[in-house]
Image (cartoon, rainbow, N blue to C red):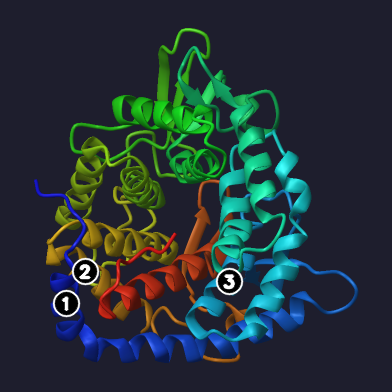
Amino acid sequence: MKIKFLSALALTVAAVQCAPQTDIIQENVDNAAVQLKSLIEASEAGDTVRIPSTYQNGEIVYVPTDDWVSGFFAGTLWYMYELTGDEYWADHARKHTEILDSIQNLKWHHDIGFMIYDSYGNGLRLKNIDGYQDVIVNSAKSLSTRFRPGAGVIQSWDSDKGWQSERGWKCPVIIDNMMNLELLMKATWFTGDSTYAKIAISHADQTLKNHYRPDYSTYHVVDYDPETGEVRGRYTAQGYSDESAWARGQAWSLYGFTVMYRYTGDAKYFERAEKVADYLFNHPNMPEDLVPYWDFDCPDIPDTYRDVSSAAIIASALYEMYGFTENALYKEKADKIIESLSSPEYRAAQGTNGGFILMHSVGSLPHGSSIDVPLNYADYYFLEALIRKGNIEKGFAPVKY
Protein backbone atom coordinates (compact mmCIF):
# COMPACT_ATOMS: atom_id res chain seq x y z
CA MET A 1 0.00 0.00 0.00
CA LYS A 2 1.26 3.45 -0.92
CA ILE A 3 0.08 6.34 1.22
CA LYS A 4 1.19 9.87 0.60
CA PHE A 5 -0.06 13.28 -0.35
CA LEU A 6 -0.11 13.77 -4.07
CA SER A 7 2.85 15.76 -5.31
CA ALA A 8 2.30 19.20 -6.77
CA LEU A 9 3.12 17.81 -10.23
CA ALA A 10 0.68 14.94 -9.88
CA LEU A 11 -2.06 17.28 -8.72
CA THR A 12 -1.36 19.64 -11.61
CA VAL A 13 -1.61 16.77 -14.10
CA ALA A 14 -4.83 15.63 -12.43
CA ALA A 15 -6.20 19.15 -12.64
CA VAL A 16 -5.50 19.33 -16.36
CA GLN A 17 -7.02 15.91 -16.97
CA CYS A 18 -10.14 16.64 -14.90
CA ALA A 19 -10.70 20.31 -15.70
CA PRO A 20 -13.66 19.80 -18.08
CA GLN A 21 -15.68 18.26 -15.25
CA THR A 22 -15.51 21.49 -13.23
CA ASP A 23 -18.69 22.66 -14.98
CA ILE A 24 -20.71 20.13 -12.98
CA ILE A 25 -19.59 21.89 -9.81
CA GLN A 26 -20.73 25.33 -10.93
CA GLU A 27 -24.01 23.96 -12.22
CA ASN A 28 -24.66 22.34 -8.85
CA VAL A 29 -23.71 25.50 -6.97
CA ASP A 30 -26.10 27.57 -9.08
CA ASN A 31 -28.87 25.07 -8.44
CA ALA A 32 -28.13 24.89 -4.71
CA ALA A 33 -28.26 28.68 -4.44
CA VAL A 34 -31.85 28.73 -5.66
CA GLN A 35 -32.92 25.94 -3.35
CA LEU A 36 -31.14 27.10 -0.23
CA LYS A 37 -32.24 30.71 -0.50
CA SER A 38 -35.80 29.42 -0.39
CA LEU A 39 -34.98 27.31 2.65
CA ILE A 40 -33.28 30.25 4.40
CA GLU A 41 -36.34 32.43 3.82
CA ALA A 42 -38.59 29.80 5.36
CA SER A 43 -36.34 29.00 8.31
CA GLU A 44 -35.78 32.64 9.22
CA ALA A 45 -39.38 33.79 8.86
CA GLY A 46 -40.67 35.49 11.96
CA ASP A 47 -38.60 36.21 15.04
CA THR A 48 -36.92 32.81 15.47
CA VAL A 49 -34.15 31.19 13.45
CA ARG A 50 -35.19 27.57 12.97
CA ILE A 51 -33.18 24.53 11.89
CA PRO A 52 -34.55 22.71 8.83
CA SER A 53 -34.02 18.97 8.94
CA THR A 54 -36.20 17.47 6.20
CA TYR A 55 -39.32 17.99 4.11
CA GLN A 56 -42.26 15.64 4.57
CA ASN A 57 -45.90 15.72 3.60
CA GLY A 58 -45.52 19.13 2.01
CA GLU A 59 -43.95 20.76 5.08
CA ILE A 60 -40.44 21.61 6.22
CA VAL A 61 -39.60 19.75 9.42
CA TYR A 62 -37.56 21.75 11.95
CA VAL A 63 -35.54 20.34 14.84
CA PRO A 64 -34.42 21.77 18.20
CA THR A 65 -30.82 22.79 18.81
CA ASP A 66 -30.04 19.59 20.72
CA ASP A 67 -31.03 17.29 17.85
CA TRP A 68 -28.07 15.44 16.35
CA VAL A 69 -28.62 17.04 12.92
CA SER A 70 -28.78 20.61 14.21
CA GLY A 71 -25.38 21.70 12.88
CA PHE A 72 -25.71 20.54 9.29
CA PHE A 73 -27.74 23.41 7.88
CA ALA A 74 -25.30 25.98 9.26
CA GLY A 75 -22.49 23.92 7.76
CA THR A 76 -24.26 23.80 4.41
CA LEU A 77 -24.43 27.59 4.37
CA TRP A 78 -20.74 27.85 5.27
CA TYR A 79 -19.99 25.56 2.34
CA MET A 80 -21.99 27.78 0.03
CA TYR A 81 -19.85 30.69 1.21
CA GLU A 82 -16.73 28.64 0.48
CA LEU A 83 -18.02 27.74 -2.97
CA THR A 84 -19.11 31.26 -3.95
CA GLY A 85 -17.27 33.82 -1.82
CA ASP A 86 -20.60 35.60 -1.43
CA GLU A 87 -21.00 37.20 2.00
CA TYR A 88 -24.74 36.54 1.85
CA TRP A 89 -24.04 32.91 2.72
CA ALA A 90 -21.62 33.76 5.52
CA ASP A 91 -24.12 36.16 7.11
CA HIS A 92 -26.84 33.53 7.24
CA ALA A 93 -24.38 30.81 8.24
CA ARG A 94 -23.48 32.87 11.33
CA LYS A 95 -27.13 33.14 12.34
CA HIS A 96 -27.62 29.39 12.07
CA THR A 97 -24.31 28.68 13.80
CA GLU A 98 -24.70 30.95 16.79
CA ILE A 99 -28.11 29.63 17.79
CA LEU A 100 -26.16 26.48 18.73
CA ASP A 101 -24.06 28.23 21.38
CA SER A 102 -25.54 26.24 24.29
CA ILE A 103 -24.60 22.92 22.69
CA GLN A 104 -21.01 23.35 23.88
CA ASN A 105 -22.31 22.23 27.29
CA LEU A 106 -24.33 19.23 26.06
CA LYS A 107 -23.25 15.96 27.69
CA TRP A 108 -26.15 13.56 27.24
CA HIS A 109 -25.23 12.22 23.80
CA HIS A 110 -22.18 11.94 21.60
CA ASP A 111 -23.27 13.85 18.49
CA ILE A 112 -21.85 17.15 19.68
CA GLY A 113 -19.05 16.65 17.13
CA PHE A 114 -21.52 16.75 14.25
CA MET A 115 -23.40 19.63 15.78
CA ILE A 116 -20.49 21.91 16.61
CA TYR A 117 -17.70 21.07 14.20
CA ASP A 118 -19.90 21.31 11.11
CA SER A 119 -21.15 24.73 12.22
CA TYR A 120 -18.58 26.48 14.42
CA GLY A 121 -15.72 24.48 12.94
CA ASN A 122 -16.42 25.59 9.40
CA GLY A 123 -17.11 29.14 10.54
CA LEU A 124 -13.78 29.30 12.32
CA ARG A 125 -11.92 27.82 9.36
CA LEU A 126 -13.45 30.21 6.85
CA LYS A 127 -13.86 33.41 8.89
CA ASN A 128 -11.72 33.01 12.04
CA ILE A 129 -14.55 34.49 14.12
CA ASP A 130 -13.73 35.47 17.70
CA GLY A 131 -15.12 33.03 20.23
CA TYR A 132 -15.66 30.13 17.84
CA GLN A 133 -12.49 28.35 18.92
CA ASP A 134 -13.57 28.55 22.56
CA VAL A 135 -16.91 26.95 21.69
CA ILE A 136 -15.12 24.09 19.92
CA VAL A 137 -12.78 23.46 22.86
CA ASN A 138 -15.63 23.60 25.38
CA SER A 139 -17.58 21.17 23.21
CA ALA A 140 -14.63 18.79 23.21
CA LYS A 141 -14.57 18.97 26.99
CA SER A 142 -18.25 18.06 27.09
CA LEU A 143 -17.78 15.17 24.67
CA SER A 144 -14.84 13.92 26.75
CA THR A 145 -17.16 13.35 29.72
CA ARG A 146 -18.63 10.44 27.78
CA PHE A 147 -15.27 8.63 27.63
CA ARG A 148 -15.28 5.36 29.56
CA PRO A 149 -11.64 4.62 30.49
CA GLY A 150 -12.29 0.98 31.37
CA ALA A 151 -13.50 0.27 27.84
CA GLY A 152 -11.42 2.94 26.10
CA VAL A 153 -14.44 4.28 24.19
CA ILE A 154 -16.80 7.23 24.08
CA GLN A 155 -20.29 6.05 25.00
CA SER A 156 -22.66 7.03 22.21
CA TRP A 157 -26.06 6.88 23.88
CA ASP A 158 -27.21 6.84 27.47
CA SER A 159 -28.78 3.45 28.08
CA ASP A 160 -31.23 4.42 30.82
CA LYS A 161 -33.72 6.41 28.77
CA GLY A 162 -35.73 6.25 25.57
CA TRP A 163 -35.86 3.26 23.26
CA GLN A 164 -32.23 2.50 24.09
CA SER A 165 -33.23 1.59 27.65
CA GLU A 166 -35.27 -1.31 26.28
CA ARG A 167 -32.23 -3.02 24.73
CA GLY A 168 -30.40 -4.02 27.90
CA TRP A 169 -27.25 -2.21 26.81
CA LYS A 170 -24.64 -0.85 29.23
CA CYS A 171 -22.29 1.17 27.03
CA PRO A 172 -23.51 1.28 23.42
CA VAL A 173 -21.05 2.62 20.86
CA ILE A 174 -22.20 3.23 17.30
CA ILE A 175 -19.99 3.48 14.23
CA ASP A 176 -21.36 7.00 13.71
CA ASN A 177 -19.26 8.06 16.71
CA MET A 178 -16.15 7.98 14.50
CA MET A 179 -17.45 11.21 13.00
CA ASN A 180 -17.15 13.04 16.33
CA LEU A 181 -13.44 12.38 16.78
CA GLU A 182 -12.38 15.29 14.58
CA LEU A 183 -13.71 17.67 17.22
CA LEU A 184 -11.35 16.11 19.77
CA MET A 185 -8.36 16.10 17.44
CA LYS A 186 -8.97 19.75 16.66
CA ALA A 187 -9.21 20.63 20.36
CA THR A 188 -5.75 19.18 20.92
CA TRP A 189 -4.53 21.14 17.91
CA PHE A 190 -5.92 24.39 19.39
CA THR A 191 -4.87 23.90 23.00
CA GLY A 192 -1.81 21.65 22.93
CA ASP A 193 -3.59 19.42 25.46
CA SER A 194 -3.11 15.84 24.24
CA THR A 195 -5.95 14.53 26.40
CA TYR A 196 -8.52 15.05 23.65
CA ALA A 197 -6.45 13.33 20.96
CA LYS A 198 -5.69 10.41 23.28
CA ILE A 199 -9.40 9.85 23.80
CA ALA A 200 -10.06 9.98 20.06
CA ILE A 201 -7.23 7.56 19.30
CA SER A 202 -8.34 5.14 22.00
CA HIS A 203 -11.87 5.18 20.64
CA ALA A 204 -10.68 4.66 17.06
CA ASP A 205 -8.42 1.77 18.10
CA GLN A 206 -11.20 0.00 19.98
CA THR A 207 -13.50 0.52 16.99
CA LEU A 208 -10.88 -1.03 14.69
CA LYS A 209 -10.68 -4.01 17.01
CA ASN A 210 -14.31 -4.65 17.79
CA HIS A 211 -16.65 -3.14 15.20
CA TYR A 212 -15.75 -5.06 12.05
CA ARG A 213 -16.62 -8.35 10.43
CA PRO A 214 -14.03 -10.35 8.46
CA ASP A 215 -15.26 -8.78 5.19
CA TYR A 216 -14.67 -5.26 6.66
CA SER A 217 -18.31 -4.36 6.87
CA THR A 218 -19.13 -2.74 10.20
CA TYR A 219 -21.67 -3.47 12.84
CA HIS A 220 -23.80 -0.51 13.79
CA VAL A 221 -23.77 -0.93 17.59
CA VAL A 222 -21.21 -2.58 19.86
CA ASP A 223 -22.23 -2.77 23.51
CA TYR A 224 -19.34 -2.75 25.99
CA ASP A 225 -19.00 -3.36 29.67
CA PRO A 226 -17.87 0.14 30.63
CA GLU A 227 -15.68 -1.13 33.47
CA THR A 228 -13.90 -4.08 31.83
CA GLY A 229 -14.16 -3.26 28.12
CA GLU A 230 -15.67 -6.69 27.40
CA VAL A 231 -17.86 -6.73 24.30
CA ARG A 232 -21.33 -7.71 25.50
CA GLY A 233 -22.88 -7.90 22.04
CA ARG A 234 -23.07 -6.51 18.52
CA TYR A 235 -26.31 -5.15 17.15
CA THR A 236 -28.06 -2.74 14.84
CA ALA A 237 -30.37 0.16 15.58
CA GLN A 238 -31.01 1.54 12.10
CA GLY A 239 -30.07 -1.34 9.83
CA TYR A 240 -32.08 -4.32 8.60
CA SER A 241 -30.66 -6.78 11.13
CA ASP A 242 -27.80 -7.16 13.59
CA GLU A 243 -25.68 -8.91 10.96
CA SER A 244 -26.59 -6.72 8.00
CA ALA A 245 -24.52 -3.87 6.58
CA TRP A 246 -26.45 -0.66 7.15
CA ALA A 247 -25.36 1.64 4.33
CA ARG A 248 -24.80 4.85 6.25
CA GLY A 249 -22.85 2.96 8.87
CA GLN A 250 -20.44 1.82 6.16
CA ALA A 251 -20.18 5.43 4.98
CA TRP A 252 -19.39 6.73 8.49
CA SER A 253 -16.76 4.00 8.75
CA LEU A 254 -15.04 5.01 5.51
CA TYR A 255 -15.10 8.71 6.32
CA GLY A 256 -14.19 8.43 10.00
CA PHE A 257 -11.02 6.42 9.54
CA THR A 258 -9.91 8.62 6.67
CA VAL A 259 -10.19 11.62 9.00
CA MET A 260 -8.22 9.85 11.73
CA TYR A 261 -5.46 9.15 9.22
CA ARG A 262 -5.42 12.84 8.29
CA TYR A 263 -4.80 13.88 11.88
CA THR A 264 -2.46 11.10 13.02
CA GLY A 265 -0.67 9.78 9.93
CA ASP A 266 -1.18 6.29 11.38
CA ALA A 267 -1.33 3.91 8.40
CA LYS A 268 -3.62 1.42 10.12
CA TYR A 269 -6.47 3.93 9.89
CA PHE A 270 -6.05 4.45 6.18
CA GLU A 271 -5.67 0.72 5.62
CA ARG A 272 -9.07 0.24 7.24
CA ALA A 273 -10.60 2.93 5.03
CA GLU A 274 -9.17 1.17 1.98
CA LYS A 275 -10.63 -2.16 3.11
CA VAL A 276 -14.03 -0.54 3.59
CA ALA A 277 -13.82 1.04 0.12
CA ASP A 278 -13.01 -2.38 -1.36
CA TYR A 279 -16.00 -3.84 0.44
CA LEU A 280 -18.33 -1.17 -0.88
CA PHE A 281 -17.28 -1.32 -4.50
CA ASN A 282 -17.11 -5.10 -4.72
CA HIS A 283 -20.43 -5.70 -3.02
CA PRO A 284 -22.89 -7.42 -5.38
CA ASN A 285 -25.71 -5.21 -4.12
CA MET A 286 -23.97 -1.91 -4.85
CA PRO A 287 -26.00 -0.36 -7.68
CA GLU A 288 -24.32 0.69 -10.91
CA ASP A 289 -24.93 4.36 -10.15
CA LEU A 290 -23.17 3.91 -6.74
CA VAL A 291 -26.11 5.24 -4.72
CA PRO A 292 -26.54 2.47 -2.13
CA TYR A 293 -29.71 0.85 -0.95
CA TRP A 294 -30.40 1.80 2.67
CA ASP A 295 -28.94 -1.56 3.78
CA PHE A 296 -26.69 -3.74 1.66
CA ASP A 297 -28.38 -6.89 2.95
CA CYS A 298 -32.02 -5.85 2.78
CA PRO A 299 -33.92 -8.83 1.28
CA ASP A 300 -36.15 -6.50 -0.75
CA ILE A 301 -33.31 -5.31 -3.01
CA PRO A 302 -33.83 -3.98 -5.67
CA ASP A 303 -37.37 -3.06 -4.61
CA THR A 304 -36.39 -0.95 -1.64
CA TYR A 305 -35.14 2.53 -0.79
CA ARG A 306 -31.88 4.14 -1.83
CA ASP A 307 -29.99 6.30 0.64
CA VAL A 308 -28.57 9.39 -1.01
CA SER A 309 -27.01 10.55 2.27
CA SER A 310 -24.75 7.49 2.28
CA ALA A 311 -23.67 8.18 -1.28
CA ALA A 312 -22.77 11.80 -0.50
CA ILE A 313 -20.72 10.81 2.55
CA ILE A 314 -18.89 8.13 0.58
CA ALA A 315 -18.08 10.53 -2.26
CA SER A 316 -16.64 13.12 0.11
CA ALA A 317 -14.48 10.52 1.85
CA LEU A 318 -13.23 9.13 -1.46
CA TYR A 319 -12.03 12.53 -2.62
CA GLU A 320 -9.97 12.84 0.55
CA MET A 321 -8.62 9.31 0.09
CA TYR A 322 -7.56 10.25 -3.42
CA GLY A 323 -5.56 13.12 -1.94
CA PHE A 324 -3.53 10.64 0.12
CA THR A 325 -2.80 8.19 -2.71
CA GLU A 326 -2.22 7.91 -6.42
CA ASN A 327 -5.22 5.61 -6.74
CA ALA A 328 -7.34 7.19 -9.46
CA LEU A 329 -10.12 4.70 -8.68
CA TYR A 330 -11.15 6.75 -5.66
CA LYS A 331 -11.72 9.89 -7.71
CA GLU A 332 -13.41 7.95 -10.50
CA LYS A 333 -15.88 6.42 -8.06
CA ALA A 334 -16.50 9.74 -6.31
CA ASP A 335 -17.04 11.47 -9.65
CA LYS A 336 -19.54 8.78 -10.61
CA ILE A 337 -21.47 9.39 -7.40
CA ILE A 338 -21.51 13.13 -8.03
CA GLU A 339 -22.80 12.53 -11.57
CA SER A 340 -25.56 10.33 -10.19
CA LEU A 341 -26.57 12.77 -7.45
CA SER A 342 -26.59 15.63 -9.96
CA SER A 343 -29.15 13.84 -12.11
CA PRO A 344 -32.92 14.45 -11.95
CA GLU A 345 -33.30 11.05 -10.34
CA TYR A 346 -31.75 12.31 -7.11
CA ARG A 347 -31.47 16.10 -7.32
CA ALA A 348 -34.70 17.99 -6.84
CA ALA A 349 -36.07 20.37 -9.44
CA GLN A 350 -35.76 24.01 -8.46
CA GLY A 351 -38.67 25.24 -6.40
CA THR A 352 -39.50 21.76 -5.07
CA ASN A 353 -38.40 19.54 -2.20
CA GLY A 354 -38.92 22.29 0.38
CA GLY A 355 -35.68 23.93 -0.72
CA PHE A 356 -33.48 20.93 0.00
CA ILE A 357 -31.02 19.97 -2.74
CA LEU A 358 -31.20 16.18 -2.82
CA MET A 359 -34.06 13.69 -2.63
CA HIS A 360 -34.32 10.04 -1.54
CA SER A 361 -32.49 9.64 1.73
CA VAL A 362 -33.38 7.33 4.61
CA GLY A 363 -33.00 8.31 8.24
CA SER A 364 -34.03 5.21 10.20
CA LEU A 365 -36.33 2.76 8.52
CA PRO A 366 -36.70 0.51 11.60
CA HIS A 367 -37.92 3.53 13.57
CA GLY A 368 -40.19 4.69 10.73
CA SER A 369 -38.27 7.97 10.68
CA SER A 370 -37.42 10.09 7.61
CA ILE A 371 -37.93 7.47 4.92
CA ASP A 372 -37.34 8.44 1.28
CA VAL A 373 -37.10 12.15 2.02
CA PRO A 374 -34.50 14.92 1.76
CA LEU A 375 -32.15 15.19 4.75
CA ASN A 376 -30.00 18.16 5.67
CA TYR A 377 -26.89 16.05 6.12
CA ALA A 378 -27.18 14.64 2.60
CA ASP A 379 -27.00 18.19 1.27
CA TYR A 380 -24.10 19.00 3.61
CA TYR A 381 -21.89 16.15 2.46
CA PHE A 382 -22.86 16.69 -1.17
CA LEU A 383 -21.57 20.27 -1.06
CA GLU A 384 -18.50 19.13 0.86
CA ALA A 385 -17.79 16.58 -1.87
CA LEU A 386 -18.15 19.31 -4.52
CA ILE A 387 -15.62 21.47 -2.65
CA ARG A 388 -13.14 18.60 -2.44
CA LYS A 389 -13.63 17.72 -6.09
CA GLY A 390 -13.04 21.34 -7.05
CA ASN A 391 -9.90 21.57 -4.93
CA ILE A 392 -8.44 18.51 -6.62
CA GLU A 393 -9.24 19.79 -10.08
CA LYS A 394 -7.59 23.12 -9.26
CA GLY A 395 -4.42 21.33 -8.20
CA PHE A 396 -4.91 21.61 -4.42
CA ALA A 397 -5.21 19.04 -1.68
CA PRO A 398 -8.91 18.11 -1.36
CA VAL A 399 -9.27 19.19 2.28
CA LYS A 400 -8.36 22.61 3.62
CA TYR A 401 -8.36 22.64 7.41
Tag 2 and tag 1, C-beta contact below 8 Å: yes
Real-space CA distance between mark 2 and mark 1, rounded to the nearest whole angstrom:
10 Å
Real-space CA distance between mark 1 and mark 3, rounded to the nearest whole angstrom:
27 Å
The label on residue 308 is none
Residue receiving disc 2: 331
Q: Secondary structure at mark 3?
A: helix
Q: Can see residue 10? A: yes
Q: Nearer the viewer, residue 79 or 32?
A: 79
Depicted 217 relative to depicted 33: above or below: above
Which badge, 1 or 3, is on the more N-terminal residue?
A: 1
Q: Secondary structure at mark 2?
A: helix
Image point (52%, 9%), residue name: 227
Depicted 190 relative to depicted 309: above or below: above
For discs 3 and 2, the disc positioned in front in the rendered view:
3
How many callouts does the rendering have? Answer: 3
The label on residue 14 is 1
Furthest residue in direction left, as rendered: 1
Task: Give the residue type at disc 2.
Answer: Lys
For residue 333, side relative to residue 361 (left or right):
left
Residue receiving disc 3: 78
Question: Picture quarter containing residue 47?
Answer: bottom right
Tag 1 and tag 3, C-beta contact below 8 Å: no
Task: Give the residue type at disc 1.
Answer: Ala
For discs 2 and 1, the disc positioned in front in the rendered view:
1
Give residue 110's position: percent from left, percent from top: 59, 37
For residue 383, side relative to residue 130 (left or right):
left
Furthest residue in direction front, as rendered: 192
